[in-house]
Amino acid sequence: MLACRQLDVLPRNGAPALVNTADADFAAGQLHALIGPSGCGKTTLLKGILGILPARGDILLRGHRVAKPEDLLREVAFAPQFSIAHGKLTVAESLDAALSLYRKTHDNDRLATLLGLVGLTERADTVVEKLSGGQLRRLGLALELAAEPACLLCDEVTSGLDPRSEDQILAVLRRLVAEQHRTVLCVIHNLAKLDQFDTVTVVYEGSVVFQGSLPALLAHFGIQDALFLYDRLAEHPVTHWRERRAPVAPVLAVAEITFEEPASPPRHTPAQAERPGFFSQLLTLLMRRGRLFGRDRATLLLTAAITFGFPCLVVIFALGGLPQLRGLGLEQNGGILETLQARAEFRRDAANTATLVSGLILFQVILLCLMGSNNGAREIAGERALFEKERMAGLRPAAYATAKLLFVAGLGAVQGVWMTVFVKLLCAFPGAWLPQLAVLSAVGASMSIVCLGLSALLTSPDRASLLSIYLVGFQLPLSGVVLALPAALVWSVRPFISTYWGWSGYLTAMRDLQDSRFYDAVLLLDPGWLAGAPSALAVLGAHAALGAALVFWGCATQRWP
């Protein structure tokens, strides 16, 4: 079913190999144990076969070379040591989402079958984060089986469990082989359980030194019990055990190992089970994300706090200052510029108010950028391992990326709309409604998307958050609104500074009003060239497009944490 020849597995490109010239065959329809001392390369070998780590050599599936890791998608599933699932969903919701993502059609019978297979029927309505360790491992197996893989690779799924939970996991694996004729390869540490496996593969110091049945293992190493295996391995260097292993058939001689199936209705293979289309997966992802957002109380409270709290800060600073300009006597004939020239006191007050107006606009834009950072920075990096696992089972990266873009962009746009409405209504902030709504919504959405792009490129949510905060932090000084910058620097960085375009687009929306005294007052500060709302929206749209490109690129590239 699955084999490797002369496989070297590296922790990263250019580094020394951790697994060297590994030759192994895992026959179809059998339960295989992969054992070896801690740190010998068992998990590394699995990840090399799956393409999670870079590898040199040949990997074969059903006797055919695997040209790229994508060739294993939906054929080979990977159950990591610690189950990866959304903690806020129930067991049934997690499995139902997996079935909807991996299979074009499914019904409640399939969900009930999976729950019964892993012994979680009574826990169907239990939230995942409330499950015990053994129950989590069984849920992890069920999630992988939702895609109907022909081969299942399990990384220490029994480690750290009590004996009863360990026996339950092994019983599930045996049922997968006996009843569904799947091929299962399991990394295991408990050598007392080897009698439950059909074959045993021994890895020692990065080399596969034995493959065969348990009786053959005892005879090969000259021991009476498998518990003495590691002591016997330590008696000789790895080269000794390599030389003692029988030669393995070369690649061209590798043939598919078949087995006799009992008379039963044929099982649909992964190739026959059509996966859902783009829009079906997109809808499932959006529904799941909405459910998670509503149930994650901490995230929900934080988002609500900044969404409603940040506009309140703007109002607090605005209420004491904006009436200044309205209170000035403007009954003189002529425009505001003539009035300012005539009255020194008015000029001083108007300059102060102009600073306040410009600052309040900039304050709104900066706060929306902070909201965007909060929206997007951890969105993908925080669940990268789950995404990579779901991608292996058939999730389309484009559907995943689109769902994330719609969610964070929508959230950022709503925050921009609320900021505009709240501040304008409570402070009677001047300016045309439509362009100001559009500009602040674009600021929130574009910054959310840019930070989502950073999240897609990084595998650490903490690093993605830190980089997003730095990005927002540099917005203020590089905008050129607060600090004077050299002309050459201004136009070399300004195209990339969302803060400037949001500030300028919002400000110029005051220009065409019948009473444009706020805008005229700001002109006293000599802000330089000002982009109108259409130009600002175009640049912010370009920022969003760049961020979206990063999201699609980051999701299309395999990046296991």
Image: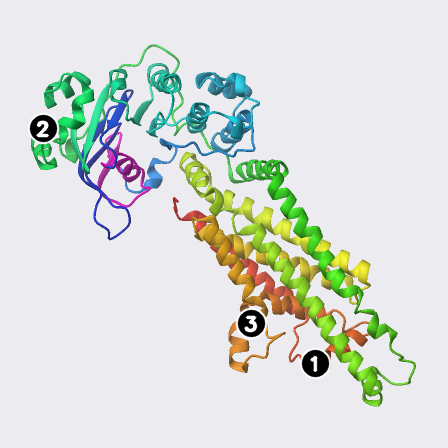
Q: Return the mark for residue 246.
A: 2
Q: Secondary structure at mark 3?
A: helix
> Which residue is label 3 attached to?
478
Q: In the image, is 231 to the left or to the right of 521?
A: left
Q: Nearer the viewer, mark 2 or mark 3?
A: 3
Specify the segment rendered in magenta. Answer: 40-65
| Residue shown at 29% from the left, 26% from the top | 188
Q: Earlier in the sequence, mark 2 or mark 3?
A: 2
| Residue shown at 51% from the left, 78% from the top | 489
Please say whether residue 251 is one of the residues in the magenta stretch: no
Q: Amino acid at mark 1?
A: Leu
Q: Quadrant of the C terminus?
A: top left
Q: Earlier in the sequence, mark 3 or mark 1?
A: 3
**Above or below, 395 relative to 526:** above
| Residue shown at 53% from the left, 55% from the top | 451
**Above or below, 116 relative to 372:** above
